[in-house]
Amino acid sequence: MTAILGISAYYHDSAAALLMDGKIVAAAQEERFTRKKHDHRFPQHAIDYCLAEAGIAPGDLDYVGFYDKPLLKFERLLETYLGFCPRGFSSFLKAMPIWVREKLHLPRLIRKGLSKEYGRQIVFPEHHESHAASAFFPSPFQEAAILTLDGVGEWATASFGLGRGNRIELTHELRFPHSLGLLYSAFTYYTGFRVNSGEYKLMGLAPYGEPKYIDLIKEHLIDLKADGSFRMDQSYFNYCQGLTMTSRKFDRLFGRPPRKPETDPGQMDMDIAASIQKVTEEIVLKAAEHVHAETGVDNLVLAGGVALNCVGNGRLLREGPFENIWIQPAAGDAGGALGVALLIWHQLLGKPRTGTGADVQSGTLLGPKFS
Amino acid sequence: MKAVAGHMANEKVVGWMQGRMEFGPRALGSRSIVGDARSTKMQTVMNVKIKFRESFRPFAPSVLRSRVHEYFEVREEEDSPYMLLVAGVRDEKRSADSMDGLVGLDKLRVKRSEVPAITHVDYSARVQTVDPDRHGRYHALITEFERQTGCPVIINTSFNVRGEPIVCSPEHAYRVFMATNMDILVMERFVLRKDDQPKADGFSREEHLAKFDLD
């Protein structure tokens, strides 16, 4: 038996996933055990659960993978902070301790979390490769275009490519700071919701409003190209250098400061929600058209946090160019744990996929059971 | 199963914990709170008295896959087991009540369809299809609800309160059950009724809610 453990941690939604001979036997998010929502700490409980489910010890593991490249991410942070120096200094000071204390010592932390019983190498693919693997390998398709859309990993904020058989290849990417996930999160912040969890509420609020700010967004905030790629005018945003998502210039453009959390959203928040939702859908549809034209296949798989925008997904299926779409149910960073494990099994070890015509995510019912 | 479906049809709110926990952000019938989607009061009851969250937030339906196209604008037997697809409620299921002239949250007061609790104000719904292969006992529950009421659609929301991660263990589930206005708790083959529970201390709502930061 080949046992492969995948881990995601230290951003949001830590998780672990375990494959035994390529079969997904367990996967879980750390928050469910620690009772702390979006817990980003080392997923010790989730790892322990996965090993217990399979009845193995840490020393029985053949491979361990982490869902992104911490050093490359560190380089992005440094370069971004230096680029905005000295304005970014306060957020630099806030971010550095956890990097110096934990993220740069990951291999050591992982070995410690595995009771020092695991002595083999640890695999670190890129963030979007993990997302892409989590979208394609469990899908029912033998061939599919892959599109990943999220906030940011190392540098990539979106990527696409092709999956065929037991291989994936990402050929194009959009780079930080231009990011659909961060654009949506900026509006989540501005309308008074919490970034990285309130995006769902913003989407739910959108149908109450009228999309009357679409032109304003497209005129000032983003320069949208025909292929769905875009550039964001960074003078309206503050996530590169500050501790907020939007800047004063953003407030002036819409004519008011961000809504205070826990006050009732007003009609303007609803109209803003409707507008950014429509713009997001337009970007996703344009990107999908482009990916379809470039790859020439009729199946699409999606992952990354933006793939949880199910309103956009519905439009993509109805109006988009793809015949069939499969979306990784743990599309956010938690799914990266599953992605890296599958990447090791198929891409690194060259193991074939079993083509059964159904997905192999088992209804995504992969956590503990009590009876 | 008969009794649980009957409680649902009587507008009781049911906590439902079965089998292996979901991986990913959505509750898909293993750690869910379920209720009658035909009820006009259920969206408010669930938001305000069970989840303690903002009243504008919509709820999602679980629907038998074999009948999904009768209620929603999707292909026949369209597979959406992961609740990642939003589709319109079909015209013939929408109500004639007009939303003209209403703005913002006033739209919530209109009975929008035959299944108002899961129909958003733009007549959309975040559909989860349920099938016998993936969903076992959850499929059996909705099938029984359909047998009693004719309706193959129920409300499915995650088993937690605002700011809390979805429950994992029976202990987590029991705490939410006791700290909210939930009526029935089903765990595997056990059915607990709120009226039968001892009014034990240590299940204060305030204390439970205080454990979690607002999301």
Image: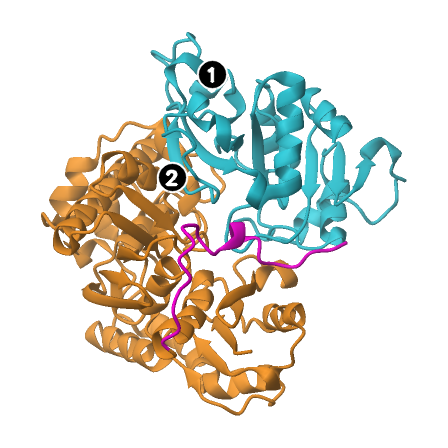
Choose between B165 and B22: the one closer to the eye: B22
Per the image, is A368 magenta? yes
Q: Dot 2 surroundings within 10 Å: few (below 14), some, or many (20 or more)?
A: many
Q: Secondary structure at mark 1?
A: loop
Mark sitting on residue A203: 2
Answer with left or right where residue A13 lies relative to residue B2. Answer: left
Q: Quadrant of residue B191?
A: top right
User: Which residue is farthest top?
Assistant: B96
Chain painted in orange in the figure:
A
Q: Are marks 2 and 1 in contact (CB under 8 Å)?
A: no
Q: Magenta part of the protein: which range? A: A350-371
Choose between B113 and A38: the one closer to the eye: B113
Residue drawn at the location 57% of the way across and 18% of the way down: B40
User: Which residue is farthest left?
Assistant: A226
Quarter the C terminus of chain A occupies: bottom right
Q: Are marks 2 and 1 on the same chain?
A: no
Residue A212 point in image, percent of width and height: 22, 30
Label 2: chain letter: A
Residue A82 shows up from this direction: yes
Q: Secondary structure at mark 2?
A: helix
